[in-house]
Image: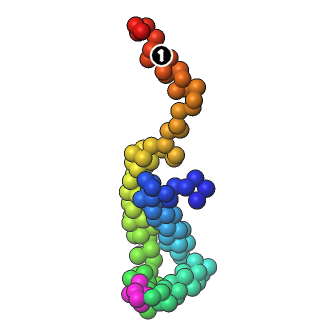
Amino acid sequence: FYHGAYKPPREFNWVVGVLLFFVTLFLSFTGYLLPWDQIAIWAITVGTNLAPYTPILGDTVYKVMVGGSSVGQPTLIRFYVAHVILLPLAGALLMAVHFWRIRKDGGEAGPPPPSRREIELSAERSTVGTAR
């Protein structure tokens, strides 16, 4: 919010940046289970048990994430595939779009407006050597 990147014409790029943030969070969440120890299993059990409380798609999201009624071998496979294949691909695609939009929109804030001195010098250069 400091630079106003959410304002036009860069609001789409700001949304892409927020999506990149969520991809990073999901990478952390899916990677936490990969050691497959008791701490990881119980942490993911707590995390996935929050899913049914989300509106509309909660139970479906839980079943897709866990792959059964509780955290087990199918959960490990799903989290591994998400962590190693799906989320890095999504992150790479979003980064490509993000960097492309930065270049297309003119960087972080675009070029600065010319100063009064630059305008005066430009006017002098354009009139040097012309007949009056």
Q: Closest to the observer: 111 or 23?
A: 111
Q: Report whether residue 44 is seen.
A: yes
Residue beneath label 1, please? 125
Say what secondary structure mark 1 lies in: helix
Judge whether 13 appears above or below 62 on screen: above
**Whether residue 34 is visible:** no
The verdict on residue 59 being magenta is yes
Toward the bottom, the furthest residue is 69
Q: How is the image coloured?
A: rainbow
Where does the image place residue 93, in percent across and percent down from the top left?
38, 57
Q: Position of residue 19 (x, y in %)?
A: 46, 64
Report whether 10 appears left or right of 36. left
Q: Is residue 89 magenta?
A: no
Q: Is residue 16 above or below residue 45?
A: above
The image quadrant of residue 40 is: bottom right
Query: What amino acid type is highlighted by mark number 1?
Result: Arg
Q: Residue 22 in the image: x percent, y percent?
A: 49, 67
Q: 19 and 72: which one is in front?
A: 19
From what the image shows, is residue 100 above or below residue 125?
below
Q: Position of residue 68 (x, y in %)?
A: 41, 89
Going 45% across and 88% down the picture, which residue do you hit?
A: 55
Q: Which residues are magenta?
A: 56-61
Report the residue at 48% width, 87% height from top. 54
The N terminus lies in which quarter of the figure?
Answer: bottom right
Q: Closer to the camera, 92 or 76?
A: 92
Write the residue at 41% across / 70% down.
82
